[in-house]
Structures are given as structure tokens and as C-alpha cells.
Amino acid sequence: MAHHQMNKKSTDSPVVLGRVSGLFGVRGWVKIHSHTSPRENILYYKRWNLSLDGKQLEVALSQGHRQSKGIVALIDGFNERTASEQLIGAEISVGRDELKSLKPGEYYWSDLIGCQVINLEGELLGEVEDMIETGANDVMVVKGEGGERLLPFVDPWLVEVELEKKRITVEWEADF
């Protein structure tokens, strides 16, 4: 099983960039919970694949902008509230080949989630369960045997990210 996944070209897998989290106003705008960092980067992509309850829908982004702490967007063909209601909870993804190439040191959160986190001593601290955007830097939520820890995803604590091994090495004491 694991062997099979390694042969799968990473270009095939869509990258989840966020989800539709609610309605905004009366004209069909929706609130977007964005996993991109910064959050408004999700708006770079003008075509989104929405998936909800096993159904897929390709949509075009009509417009969107940052709204206080979140993102709001208007999706083509969904310009009234009742139409947009059916999109709530949909995952937003784009094909990996559509992603803009990242600068070194930039990562997609969806690629980091599920990575094993080890320290320089080789001790397993746990698995990345979520990422949090704080004002200063991104933070990994790492779930291990001892519960959850929040680790800063930034130098000097971040040593190495090896996505193909799904492994992140950090400078962090296991008992800290």
C-alpha cells in the first residue's frame, strides 16, 4: 500500500487551500477559511475545485478580498444567498500543477499537515495536526503521546523540512 502511494506523481494530487466556511451578506458572497499563508494568497487562483460530500465542482472565482481576519469571495454563478448556501463546508483545492512555484523556505500547509516532527536527537515529537497563523510567524500544532505542543515554524527552531519523507526536524527538547 505504501509503495503504491510513492509511485503516485505528486502532480496528480490536488492541494487543499481552504474551505467555504459560511455566507457573507445577501448577495451570494461566501466566507473562506484559507490555509494559505498569507491568507489572501488563495485568491491568486481563479479556478477552484470544490468538493463536498463526494461531489466535485469546478468553479471560477469572480472576486474576493480580505475581510478583517478572513477572506470573502464571490464565485461565478453563485450570486445569491440561497445558491451559495449549498457550498458551505466545501473543500477548496487546486491542481498541484496550477500552484505558483514557491520560493525556497515556503510551504503549503496542506503538505506540512501529517508530517512527523523529530528533534535533532532523533526523538519523535509527534505529527503536525494543524498550522496556525499568528501575527509574527506560523506555528505547528504537533500532536504526540504527551498531547499537543505548539512549535514555531521559523528559524532557529526549524531545522529541516523533507516533504518527500513527510518529516520535519526541529531544534526542540522532547520533554519541553
Image (tube, rainbow, N blue to C red):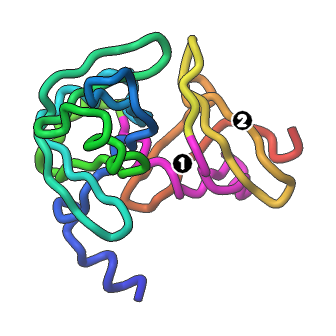
| Residue 41 appears in the picture as rendered | no
Residue at the disc numbered 1: 168
Q: Nearer the viewer, mark 2 or mark 1?
A: 2
Q: Residue at x 76, y 41 (%)?
A: 149
In the figure, is residue 58 to the left or right of 142? left
Q: Quadrant of residue 22?
A: top left
Image height of 66 relative to 43, above or below:
above
Given residues 10 and 119, the one toward you in this image is: 10
**Percent x, y of residue 139:** 60, 30
Callout 2: few (<14), some (14-19), or many (20+) C-alpha neighbours within 10 Å? some
Which numbered disc flags the more N-terminal residue, 2 or 1? 2
Quick one: quadrant of the C terminus? top right
Q: Which amino acid, by three-letter code, is at mark 1?
A: Ile
Q: Residue at x 66, y 41 (%)?
A: 141
Magenta stretch? Answer: 107-130
Q: Residue at x 42, y 36 (%)?
A: 35
* Element type where label 1 sits in the image: strand
* Inter-mark Cα distance, 2 to 1: 14 Å
**Where residue 150 is drawn, which disc sits there?**
2
Image height of 45 relative to 130, above or below:
above
Does the magenta-highlighted stretch encompass residue 16? no
In the figure, is residue 104 to the left or right of 155? left
Q: Which amino acid, by three-letter code, is at mark 2?
A: Leu
Q: Residue at x 12, y 50 (%)?
A: 97
* Element type where label 2 sits in the image: strand
Quick one: quadrant of the N terminus? bottom left
| Residue 42 appears in the picture as rendered | yes
Callout 1: few (<14), some (14-19), or many (20+) C-alpha neighbours within 10 Å? many
**Percent x, y of residue 146:** 86, 54
**Percent x, y of residue 37:** 39, 26
**Percent x, y of residue 102:** 24, 33
